[in-house]
Image (cartoon, grey):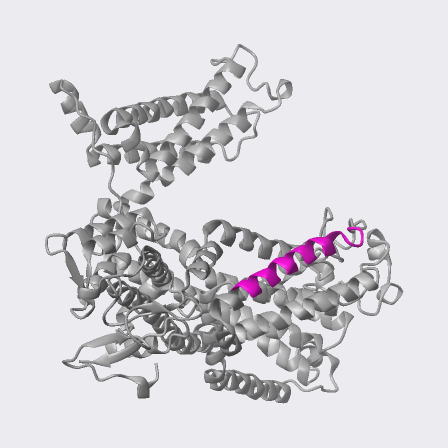
Amino acid sequence: MESDCLLAASGRHAAATLYGTGSAKDDTGELLCSSGCDSRSEQTDEELYIQQAAVLIEDAIQYRSINHRVDANSLCLYRWYYSRIFQWGFGLTIAGVLLLAFVERPSSLSVTSDSRYRLPSWEPPCGFTESIEIVCLIIFILDLAVKSYLIGWEEFRKNKWLISYTVVISVSIIDWVLSISMACDEKLRVRRLIRPFFLLQNSSLMKKTLKCIKRTLPEIASVILLLALHLCLFTMIGMLLFPKTEDPVKNEEWKVYFRNLPTSLTSLLVLLTTANNPDGTYCLMNLVTAIIYNQFRGYLLMSVQTSIIRRRLGIRAAFQVLICHEAENAAEDRVPVDVVLQVMSRVQMQSYYRAAITAEARQYEPEGFMDREQFRKMFDELDKDRIKEHPPLPEYNNVVLQKMQLVFSHYYFTILGNAVALANVVCICTVLVLNSEKSIAERDNHYMEIINLCFIIYYLFEMAVKIFAFGWKGYLSYRNNIFDGFLTVLLLVLQITIYATYRLPHTHGVRDPSFKRMFSLWEMVRFVNMLIVFRFLRIIPDIKLMALVASTLLDLVKNLRAFAGILVVVYYVFAVFGIWLFEGVIKPPAHMSVLSNTTMENITSNFSIECGTYEQLGYWPNNFDDFAASIILLYDIMIINNWQVFMDAYSRYTSEWSKIYFVCWWFTSSVMWVNLFMALILENFTYKWDRSHSCSVTDVERIRYETSVQLIFKEQIKEPTEEELLCQLQQHPHLHLHWEHT
């Protein structure tokens, strides 16, 4: 929004005008809108207006830019491009090209990643993965061509992501040709490093997130400087406190932790990330997290502001296009309700919101028209929480059946079922405590089975009477009933299997015929007990706080995928770099079984069997010898799982410079991204808690909260003004709207 483009429209009416007279299309077939649309317009033009409005509304719903071609053919191509089938297919293409890293050399197709026992993995023949990759690259080229055509050359030149997309595809093709020419025997594949770009460019929210992170980095430079100053200061103090002396007994600290400057810095950095340093764990690192998130949140708000403007702009553009549909309504700045309903019938959106918006529009049918503000408010339904309506209860004529239905459909009956499930879990816990010191042969599992049978009969009774009270459709409309019913049926099948197999009560003298059957009675009972304990999770929807926590975790999978996607990209890039730098550098001795009788000098100068080292802890499967093993190793470092052991091992087998790689990954993943992700989880939970604190448990189950990133920060977002929207509509490269004031 450029401030010099704002139009002073206070008390005046802004209308669209044509480059000449009437409503027409320019030589490219794109819309030119006027204040007086010609009543003699052809039916095809009216169809075009409706199609344009439908697409603009779809752009608003999905927070997409409206700066694309709007002629009939382009709109058909545009809707096909954003169709669910194409987007799913394109997503599978991106997933396929990323998954090639698991098959390419060094292949991850091996039984184990343990370098002591790993056999040569299967290597695909030359041309196998390359054929799949070139197909994916051709699809990316077509994707680039469609995007470039739809937005036009002028917009393409301004779009840095599409220019980068072109460069990445070109580099990938050149590198692919080099691979084929070298018979797939090249040591370095540059295109593997840039493959995550295909994932980034396909998600607008990922782009916004990455842009926010890029803007945040300079802001947190002072925090990084503070952390570096903290480490350097205490490194010098440590080297002064623990110097090398003439007494070898007093040199242990110097030898292990303060031998030189790199070792001293590494030692204190490791100390900073462990629970042995409360100053770092509870003070400094939390301060770093708070500052990082505060800066990132500010830029994220700016990015979300852009998304909100896109929605408002799409709705405003759709309204302006519909004005051209009726000549007499253009001057009055209103649109017919029947035209709005016709447009909404063509918009591709969720049926629930289509019905809500249509119902809102039908309220104006007596008047026959909607003004601009009414049209805008109609789409506020998109931001409202979705209320799930359960099917009506079945009707019974018999008075007794009606009373039974009232009892079995009451909330207290569900509470009774939870109490019975709790009693079952308590019985299992009691038996486990009593049998904890007994061997399997000494345990009498038949009594536990009889107890479980009694509870399972009640579970079956509860499921049956709920189906009677709610009906099949009503019973299945509750997610906890589906969970509960599935486990009840599974428990019943297992119980029947146990009784058919072991014919309880057991015959005299045969206590546990495990030696005669595939599964012993104890194993079957243990499986049943695990299912019963798992079934106890049915209480989650009936406890408000637990229901909110569970729904928050489910929403994270759906609404914060962009943030997880950035983490996938970072993992991918660091894993490729790790393979390039450290593949095969750690090699176990030829005879691990004779280590105890072998001196260090006879093995290798880098090998160490000291307590706490890579070799002594048996971390051989954690390496950079293939892509899958690299991902696991990076995950271990991210969660601070003895990460100093891996850093020490690779610095011994390579050089001290390898520590830079591990420190960079620790800072990127553990300090920045994990803490940032946790902060966003808190934002999501707080948002849902604030909106549901006045709701009952039943309401929490019925309401599906809209928790997109845009809505989480909605209260802090400033709505765009009419002048700002008109300014951006003026700058549309293909709609060509000119404005007058009357």
- The x and y percentages for residue 663 are 61, 74
Q: Magenta segment range?
A: 124-146
Can the viewer see residue 674 in this picture?
Answer: no
Between residue 160 and residue 235, name the one nearer to us.
160
- The x and y percentages for residue 721 are 24, 76
Quadrant hosting residue 163: bottom right
Q: Residue furthest right?
A: 602
* Left or right of residue 319, residue 609 in this image: right
Quadrant hosting residue 234: bottom right
- The x and y percentages for residue 468 are 25, 24
* Left or right of residue 377, residue 185 in this image: right
Q: Residue furthest top?
A: 508
- The x and y percentages for residue 166 are 61, 71
Q: Is residue 426 magenta?
A: no
In the depicted structure, whether residue 164 falls above or below residue 60: below
* Left or right of residue 721, residue 506 in this image: right
Between residue 474 and residue 58, name the one nearer to us.
58
Quadrant containing the N terminus is bottom left
In the depicted structure, whether residue 358 falls above or below residue 666: above
Q: Is residue 145 magenta?
A: yes
Quadrant containing the C terminus is bottom left
Quadrant hosting residue 653: bottom right
Between residue 681 and residue 336, name the one nearer to us.
336
Overall secondary structure of the magenta section? helix
Q: Say how many tags the image has.
A: 0
Between residue 485 and residue 592, name the one nearer to us.
485
Q: Residue at x 55, y 28 (%)?
A: 523
Can the viewer see residue 556 in this picture?
Answer: yes
